[in-house]
Amino acid sequence: MAAVTGDLVDAPGAVLIGEDGAASARAHSVPDDAALIVLTDGHPSNVPHCKETLRVEAVSAAHRIAHAVRLAMTEPRGPVHLAISPGVASAAAVPLATSCRPDPLPYPDGVALDQAARDLSRASRPLLLAGLHCRSADAVQWLRAFVEALPAPLLTTPRAKGALPDPHPLTLGVLGLGGVSERLLSRADLVVALGLDTHEANALPKACWSNAPMLVFGPAAVPDGRLPAAHVIGDVSAIIEELAIRLRDKPRADWDVAEVDRLRREGAARGGDGLAARVVRLAREATPAGTIATVDAGHYRESVLTAWHAVAPREFLASNDLAQSFALPAAIAAHLVHPDRYVVCFTGANEVGTVATELETVARLAARIVIVVHETDGTGAAAMRLADEVGLSVSAVASEAAFSQAFGRALNGAGGSLIVVRP
C-alpha cells in the first residue's frame, strides 16, 4: 500500500511495520522500483534488497530522514530502511537543514541528441515504447506531440498504460501481449524506448534489441550487455523538446495506416470474447473518467490489460512482480490517495485469499472499491464468505446482464463490494 501510495503522488511512500512484516513490504517494492521508506523499531541490521539501512537517533533524525527520501527517489528508485532507536519518537525535534529533493537529472547531452536525431531522420517505420517515466504531466504532453509528429505507433509497459490514452489511434496496446507486439517489432526499422525504468528496461523482449536498432531515452541505465544506437540520459520531456528542434524538417514516417489500424483492432480482440473480457469492457463503460483499475497476475490479466481503456497515467495499476497479490492492497492505496474516485480491483479467488485481511480494511474505510473476482473451479465461494463476514456487499454472476446489474448496484452503494464472476 505504501509503495503504491508513493507511486501515485510521485514521492516516497512510508510504512511503519514490525520485523515480521518487513520482508513482504520489501518484496513488493524491489521489482516495482518503488520509492519506499521502511520504518522499523530497533532493528538496525542491514535489510536485504534495501538501498541502505540507516540507524536513526534523536539528534540525527531529521538528517537521516532527508537522506532516506533523497536516496529512495534517486534513480533507480528503491526502498530505504530506517531503524528507529528507542525514544526517538518522543524526543524533541531537531531543525531540518537538508534538502529532501533528489539531485536533478542531467540535461540531455547534445552529441547523444544529434545521434538520436540522425537515426530518427533515417527511419521510415519507427516504433515507440513508453515506460513509467512518461507519466509526469510534462512528459505526457511531449509524448503525445512526439507520437503524432512522427507519426509512429506506440506500445506501453503495463505501468505506463494511459501515458497516451488507450483510445488514441496510435496506441497499439501493452508491450508483450501476444502477436501484435511481435509483428510491430518485425516491421519497425527503429525502436525508441522512452522513459523505461530499470526493471522495464531489463524485461524488454529480445526482439526489441535484435530486430532493429534501438534508441534509449530517459533516466534508467541500459541493461548490461545491450548496446543501443544512442542513449540519451535525462528527463523525457527535456529530451523530446530538444529533439523537436533537430527533427523539424524530418520526413514523416511511412507506416501503412491501414496496417497500423488492422494491428490495433487485432490487439483489441486479443483480450478475448469470453465472459472475463466482456465484464472488463462493461465495467469500463459503466465508470466515469478518473476511475482507477488494479489487476493481479491471474489468467484474466491479459483481458484486463487489453480491455480496460486508461485515458490518463496512473489510472491503471499493475505490478512487475507476477507472483504476489497486488491488486487489492493497491486498490486501497488508490482510495487513500483519491477518495473521490471509483476504484475497480480485478483479481482472483486465490489472490484474495492471500490478502483476506484487507477485505476488512475496505469495509472499515467504507471505500468505494468494487472487487471483481474471476472464479476458477468454484473457488469464489470462500472469497464471498470472507467478504460477507466483514460487511461488504457480495454477489455472484454468470452472465453479462447479471454483472451489469451487480456492478451498477456496487457503484451506487455506500462502500465496498465484491462480485464473483463465474465462467
Image (cartoon, grey):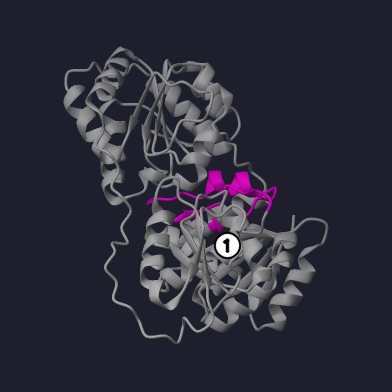
Q: From what the image shows, is residue 200 above or below residue 159?
A: above
* Farthest top residue in view: 122
Q: Position of residue 165 (x, y in %)?
A: 38, 45
Rendered-image quadrant of the C terminus: bottom right
Towards the viewer: 272 or 64: 64
Rendered-image quadrant of the N terminus: bottom right
Main SS class of the magenta portion in the image: loop
Asked if residue 26 shows in the view, the reply is yes
| Extent of the magenta region | 294-323
Q: From what the image shows, is residue 16 above or below residue 45?
A: below
Total numbered labels placed on residues in the image: 1
Q: Amino acid at mark 1?
A: Cys
Is residue 307 part of the magenta span, yes or no?
Answer: yes
Q: Position of residue 362 (x, y in %)?
A: 58, 76
Q: Is residue 134 left or right of residue 297?
A: left
Q: Position of residue 11 (x, y in %)?
A: 38, 60
Asked if residue 11 shows in the view, the reply is no
Q: Residue at x 44, y 18 (%)?
A: 188
Towards the viewer: 108 or 54: 54
At label 1, counting other C-alpha atoms closer than 10 Å, the crowd grade (few under 14, some 14-19, many 20 or more) is many
Q: Is residue 417 left or right of residue 91?
A: right
Residue under pointer 1: 345
Q: Position of residue 86 (x, y in %)?
A: 54, 81
Is residue 417 part of the magenta span, yes or no?
Answer: no
* Farthest right residue in view: 377
Q: Residue at x 60, y 59 (%)?
A: 46
Secondary structure category for the residue under label 1: strand
Towards the viewer: 209 or 300: 209
Q: Is residue 422 left or right of residue 219?
A: right
Q: Is residue 234 left or right of residue 216?
A: left
Instruction: Find residue 380 and report its image quarter.
Output: bottom right
